[in-house]
Image: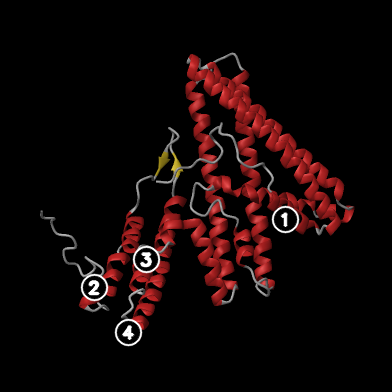
Amino acid sequence: AVVIVVGGCKDFSVPEDPLVSPGQVDRIAGILGLSEEQKASARDLYGAYRGEFDLARGKLTDFYRRADRVHETTGDDAAVKAKERAKEKFDGHVAALRTRLIEDLHELVTPEQMAKWPLVERRLRRDELGEWGGLHGSGIDVAAVFEHIEKPGDRASRVAEIIDQYEDSIDRPLIEGRRVKGEWARREERLKKSAAAPDPAEQQRATTAFLSRLLTISQSMQRVNMRTVGELEDALPTARAAEFRDEFNGRAFGEMFTPGSFMTLVAEVERLDDLTAKQRERIDALREEYLGEVRRTGAVWAKAVVAWEQSKSVNAEGGEENKDEPPSVTSAKAAREALEPRYRKSVAGLLTPSQLEQFPGLDGREALGEIEF
């Protein structure tokens, strides 16, 4: 079942990285067309920002360590509450550092470059997509996936048009997501400061409405991403489309498109020093056929999972409706998993008896038996 956690829970861990990464600064420079001198100044600003973040992170880590020690020594839960307050202060401080960095970057740019700043804001919002990964493919930046595999000549007019449309389309649910999560955070802050205990029924209704809205937004992002991937695949030349689709599928669907242990077996078989040229040719062909079947069955499985996730909703208790795996997903998963034994059997059929002896059990016969002393 899919677990939808997109901003609804507080995180009191110590973050490893700041809110703005070096890659984000580089992307900002590219969007604005900064000169080399401006880029150098931007790197200096980022270095100072990173230094302040690391200093704050170190202080929080030390505070957590002392609080944990106090809790272990005294058993006083006040130390836990102190950690929560410390994290809230840290989050506020880090957010202020980010705001200041952005303001400092403003000072670097010319008025003509500043006119492109809305594009920077849009790009920065797309960096938040990772927070919306509860559904397969919802937390992926399709434009970034394309840029990862892009080669000169790929960005033809139709491809550029699709990317532009995507950046606009995915920005809308991101803005809405920010708004919804911001409203919920402000509501939680008001409740924390209120002397009156919240009404349980009202709290349940509010929580259900919040989770339902988060799910709807994540589903919207998933639809935008899946539609854009299909459009880009149609617009790219066949070989480039396959590379792009493989890259997206690997990020969005993981195990559904990841080759299984058969590939390890093939690599072991190919190390045999007595394989004939004909055997090697047939093994190569079998490998390519297997990888094609992985893509085909993985696509069916992924399509079934996306359809299932699009049908989900939040019930009155805040849980998932349609949480039981439908037959379409079960059968698609089974078809994918059936590839391994089928192709193992095919490899066994290509080997001689003496070669098979080096792979006990591959021919389906008893592999170990019982040990005797």
Disc 2 or disc 3, which is closer to the eye? 2
Locate residue 206 relative to residue 44 in the image: left or right. Answer: left
**Going 35% across and 85% down the picture, which residue do you hit?**
277
**Going 42% across and 40% down the picture, which residue do you hit?**
320
Q: Is residue 115 visible?
A: no
Amino acid type for the residue under numbered disc 3: Thr
Q: Which residue is mark 3?
A: 264
The residue lying toward the viewer, choosing from 235 and 88, is 88
Locate residue 360 relative to residue 132 in the image: left or right. Answer: left
Residue reaching furthest to the front = 373
- Regarding mark 1 in the picture, which secondary structure is present there? helix
Q: Earlier in the sequence, mark 2 or mark 3?
A: 3
**Going 33% across and 78% down the picture, which residue do you hit?**
273
Amino acid type for the residue under numbered disc 4: Thr
Q: Earlier in the sequence, mark 3 or mark 1?
A: 1
Amino acid type for the residue under numbered disc 2: Leu
Q: Is residue 86 visible?
A: yes
The residue lying toward the viewer, choosing from 21 and 303, is 21
Q: Which residue is mark 4?
A: 276
Give the CA separation, mark 2 to mark 3.
Answer: 16 Å
Give the CA separation, mark 3 to mark 4.
Answer: 20 Å
Give the CA separation, mark 3 to mark 1.
Answer: 39 Å
Query: Residue 7: x percent and y percent?
Result: 56, 38
